[in-house]
Image: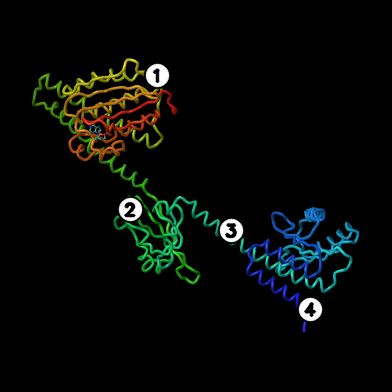
Amino acid sequence: MLPDFRVRQRDYLLEISRLMTEELDLQALLQRILRIAIEMLIGHAGFIALKDEKKGLHIAVHEGMPEALFNYIERWLESLPQTEEEDGEVYVPEINRMLNEVSMGMITGVGINMIFQKEFIGQIYVFRNYRGAFSANDRAVLTSFANQAAIAVRNARLFNQTREQSLRLEALLDSVADGILILKPDLTVERMNRSLQRMLQVKEEDCIGKHIQAVFEWAKPPQGTRIEEAIMEIWPNTAQEHQYLEGDLVRKVTRDTLPVGITYGPLFSEQGELLNIIASVRDITRFRTAEEMQNSFISVVSHELKTPIALIKGYVSTLRRDDVQWDRDVVQESLAVIEEEADHLTAMVDDLLDATRLQTGGLSIHKSEISIPAIVKSLVPRFETQSPEHSLVVDFPEDYPPVVADEDRIRQVLSNLINNAIKYTPAGEIRISGKVRQKDVVVCVSDHGPGIDPRDIPYIFERFYRSDEVAKKTKGTGLGLYLSREIIKAHSGKIWVDETYQEGSRICFSLPFSPTSS
Ligand code: ADP
């Protein structure tokens, strides 16, 4: 039979071992170890000090220590040299000597270094406030506790490290702008980051465990290598090569499509077993837009610029024929057409240049105080001679105030709007009217033409947009309203289609009295 205290000691050690597997909170575990150690050694107080890189040796948990003693020991610990202890036995005799001195022998203590695989982890200390030396057995008991505590600290630190790493990884996954999807080898979802949830308009918890086909809904079959193909045919031969897939994903809620490029690669174990497939999903709307813009640019340049050039060339070749004597009127008429087409060309090239400038850094705006009615009046005669079938009516109130704006740019906007009204309306009245509101002034250009199809209204201010119907019948680049919108935006104003107007089209813009941006 074991003596009673041995049985208790064994039970306590068993309890500590059990706690170590159950309790992952280091503080709680240390507190428990200290309490048991004090109880076992019939002490009154104690502490466990830990050493870490940042704080050095510091009290991690303590029990029953009067505040004065706690503060004293804490300061004393701080003052200890921070050198590495070779055998782990440096501080214990010292602290005992110090305690003996301060309590005049009233407090006795026993302390043991906590060592794990030759590494000094800290110290465990138990005090008694009555005279009575600690025996060799007391030291042996405390040593077992110290060993357990050292292992516990090690485990808890490892656990914390792993937890921190995984938290960092989670945070990293959620902070990237690209969508990230982690798949199991059977192509079911293991993890989906926030960006991808936003892109697809789904929640991660609804997708976990689902097959990728149930999560990615393609508007039409994507281009590139399918994941199944990569698993079966590519990765077994060319280890770990990344693959690319591109297409339009259907978003769950709004049901619109999102163009994406997906790069994915395998994660193999050391034994060559496929663990995961990691896919990074990028929103490629901007690339698509840039690509479309490039295509539109090419088509505008090839179709729209070619027409006036062909006309000019035709007239010039005709005039140059030496076998015919052209009379003066024909020459004048031909030169007028050439001039008009050259002006048309210049206007188109200017628009294209402005559109490019907007892409690369914005238009320059030079503001001064301007009178919009005066600009309109100066424009009218030119349009009237150009198009006798239309009558232009200028309708501004007498007290229409001046505004601070870029005169040339506002003239460009007005010309675009009047030009469109003339271009899209066979004949009739075109009214350019002004209104003063509380914070801004409004200008509207109305015609009695076919109007703008409501389906086109959301897009007509987009770059290169022309309604299909109109594009077949008229010439244009689809840049006029886009540039107008950008110019008005640069003046902190707004431009819109007045949908209440039913007799044709009415496009209005507003300019604030005190523009916020210059
Ligand atoms: P463009 O006139 O070169 O096509 P805009 O950007 O000026 O380019 O106009 C974009 C589109 O808006 C036009 O193609 C046309 O479909 C529509 N639109 C603009 N103004 C009018 C109008 N006054 N009447 C009817 N449609 C118009």
Provide the residue designation for mark 1. Answer: 369
Image quadrant where one finds the N terminus: bottom right
Whether ligand 1 has any atom under 8 Å from the Cβ at mark 2 is answered as no
Q: Label 4 neighbourhood size at 10 Å, few (<14), some (14-19), many (20+)?
A: few
* 386, above or below 273, in the image: above
The residue located at (72%, 73%) in the rendering is 13
Q: Quadrant of residue 488?
A: top left
Q: Which mark is residue 248?
A: 2
Which quarter of the rendered picture does the C terminus lie within? top left
Please name whichever residue, 322 or 18, is drawn nearer the observer in this view of the structure: 18
**54, above or below 385, in the image:** below
Q: Which quadrant would residue 32 be assigned to in this image?
A: bottom right
The amino acid type, in three-letter code, at marker 2 is Asp
The amino acid type of the residue labelled 1 equals: Glu
* Residue at 17% from the left image edge and 31% from the top image edge: 311
Query: What amino acid type should be assigned to the residue bearing mark 4?
Result: Asp
Instruction: Work out how far the residue at label 3 is from the one at label 4, CA to CA, in angstroms.
Output: 44 Å
Residue topped by disc 3: 164
Q: Specify the farthest residue to the top.
A: 398
Q: Earlier in the sequence, mark 2 or mark 3?
A: 3
For badge 3, the amino acid type reads Glu
Specify which label sits upstream in the sequence, 1 or 4.
4
Q: Position of residue 481 (x, y in %)?
A: 30, 33
Q: Earlier in the sequence, mark 4 or mark 2?
A: 4
- Give the side of residue 229 with respect to residue 316, left or right: right
The residue under label 4 is 4
Q: Quadrant of residue 147?
A: bottom right
x and y, in percent, of residue 298 in the image: 27, 41
Residue 71 in the image, given as x and y percentages of width and height: 79, 53
Q: Is residue 34 left or right of residue 453?
A: right
Q: CA distance from mark 1 to mark 2?
A: 49 Å
